[in-house]
Image: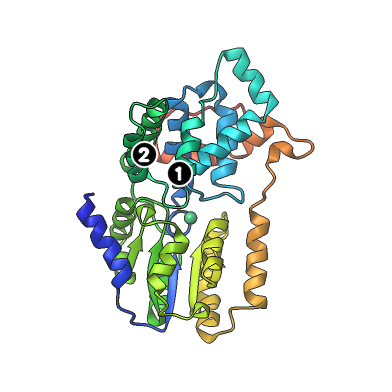
């Protein structure tokens, strides 16, 4: 995608005309599309092992990365922040360190990653700013690590584009969007690159429901909502729909309401939105007890404490618990791909 298309997309977000009384901001990955599981298992995690020669600790890396990206409070966080969490957790696990010492494996130095995140965390973390930073740090001691990080990030995008195709939206999406768009202007707010969002929403003929699409390059989700709202909609008439705590934070930052799509119970969540929650939102009775009860359910589904810090933890048991999910992803999207399978029983 060229910068002209991106500029046009940003203009569209800023300048769409308000047609309805309400505004709804909708996250995409893991919320509308069942894309989080394949993107993480097939692209993000193997590319870390490939680029940083970490296949020897595959079971630990996958377990940690799945916790960070899919099954905890940090679900859906930016990929560079996720890398920081992953390395931090791995460094803190003695049993993983033992394997690394045995096999002569070293975790990557994170000075360059940390410097980049620190420099751009309040602006935007994504390939365009990383590219800018690589140029800025040319001929410095960070240059080669930053270039490698950028190459990894580009390889992830490429793997996603090549391998993960035609992910259908969850059930009840079309019904929900159709109903929602009767009273609300809809915008997509996401930390996925714009090009991928545009492609996915078009592919499934969902783009017709939305006034604008905001991606990773256009800033954080809370900014997306602010830009889209432009003080045109009162905050109690703005609803954010998402599947991660970061989505709720983006809503909170704008004083907006939040409806969670609960990980693992997505279809049920969309059905409830279509059949019940939307009517409450438009009727002004969503806020209060109703919203609080749904958010409490959501919080319970995403713990902050990792399984390996729980008493009675077994690495084998924990790795095998997600094995059916990993296998299903590989069978569907990358049958030839490399995946460690532990014996059943
Ligand atoms: Mg999401």
The image quarter in which residue 104 lies: top right
The residue nearer to you, when weighing 264 against 306, is 306
Dot 2 or dot 1, earlier in sequence: 1
Secondary structure, mark 1, is helix
Outermost residue, bottom direction?
283
> Can you tell me whether the CB of the residue at mark 1 lies under 8 Å from the nearest atom of ligand 1?
no
Near mark 2 (Cα within 10 A), the count class, few <14, some 14-19 or many ≥20, is many
Q: Is residue 154 left or right of residue 72?
A: left
Q: Is residue 250 left or right of residue 160?
A: right
Residue drawn at (23%, 49%), measured in percent from left and top? 1
Return the x and y of residue 11 as percentages of the image width and height.
27, 65
Residue 323 appears in the picture as rendered = no
Residue drawn at (44%, 57%), measured in percent from left and top? 220
Secondary structure, mark 2, is helix
Q: Point out the image quarter for the C terminus.
A: top right
Near mark 1 (Cα within 10 A), the count class, few <14, some 14-19 or many ≥20, is some
Residue drawn at (63%, 39%), measured in percent from left and top? 321
Relative vertical location of residue 168 with respect to residue 176 in this rendering, above or below: above
Name the residue carrying label 1: 119
Q: Is residue 326 left or right of residue 209?
A: right
Residue 133: numbered disc? 2
Q: CB under 8 Å between callouts 2 and 1? A: yes
Q: How many marks?
A: 2
Return the x and y of residue 175 as percentages of the image width and height.
42, 72
> Mark 2 and mark 1: span between their CA atoms?
9 Å
Relative vertical location of residue 106 with respect to residue 171 in this rendering, above or below: above
Residue drawn at (54%, 24%), measured in percent from left and top? 107
Relative vertical location of residue 108 with respect to residue 68 in this rendering, above or below: above
């Amino acid at each position: 995608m060229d910068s002209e298309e991106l500029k046009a997309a940003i203009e569209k977000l800023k300048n769409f005309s308000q047609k309805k009384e309400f505004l709804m901001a909708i996250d995409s990955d893991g919320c509308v599309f069942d894309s989080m599981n394949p993107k993480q298992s097939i692209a993000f995690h193997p590319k870390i092992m490939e680029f940083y020669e970490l296949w020897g600790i595959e079971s630990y890396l996958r377990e940690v990365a799945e916790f960070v990206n899919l099954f905890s409070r940090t679900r859906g966080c930016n990929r560079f922040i996720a890398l920081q969490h992953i390395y931090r957790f791995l460094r803190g696990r003695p049993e993983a360190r033992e394997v690394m010492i045995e096999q002569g494996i070293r975790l990557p130095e994170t000075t360059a990653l940390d410097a980049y995140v620190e420099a751009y965390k309040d602006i935007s973390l994504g390939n365009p700013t990383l590219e800018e930073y690589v140029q800025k740090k040319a001929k410095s001691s960070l240059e080669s690590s930053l270039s490698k990080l950028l190459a990894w990030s580009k390889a992830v995008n490429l793997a996603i584009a090549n391998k993960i195709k035609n992910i259908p939206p969850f059930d009840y999406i079309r019904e929900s969007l159709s109903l929602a768009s009767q009273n609300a202007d809809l915008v997509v707010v996401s930390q996925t690159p714009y090009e991928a969002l545009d492609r996915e929403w078009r592919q499934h003929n969902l783009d017709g429901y939305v006034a604008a699409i905001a991606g990773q390059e256009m800033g954080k989700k809370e900014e997306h909502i602010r830009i889209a709202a432009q003080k045109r909609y009162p905050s109690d008439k703005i609803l954010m729909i998402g599947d991660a705590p970061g989505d709720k934070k983006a809503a909170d930052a704008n004083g907006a309401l939040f409806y969670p799509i609960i990980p693992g119970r997505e279809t049920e969540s969309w059905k409830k939105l279509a059949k019940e929650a939307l009517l409450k939102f438009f009727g002004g009775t969503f806020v209060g007890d109703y919203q609080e009860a749904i958010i409490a359910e959501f919080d319970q589904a995403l713990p902050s404490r990792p399984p390996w810090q729980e008493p009675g933890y077994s690495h084998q048991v924990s790795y095998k618990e997600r094995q059916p999910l990993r296998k299903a992803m590989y069978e569907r999207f990358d049958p030839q791909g490399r995946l460690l399978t532990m014996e059943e029983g």
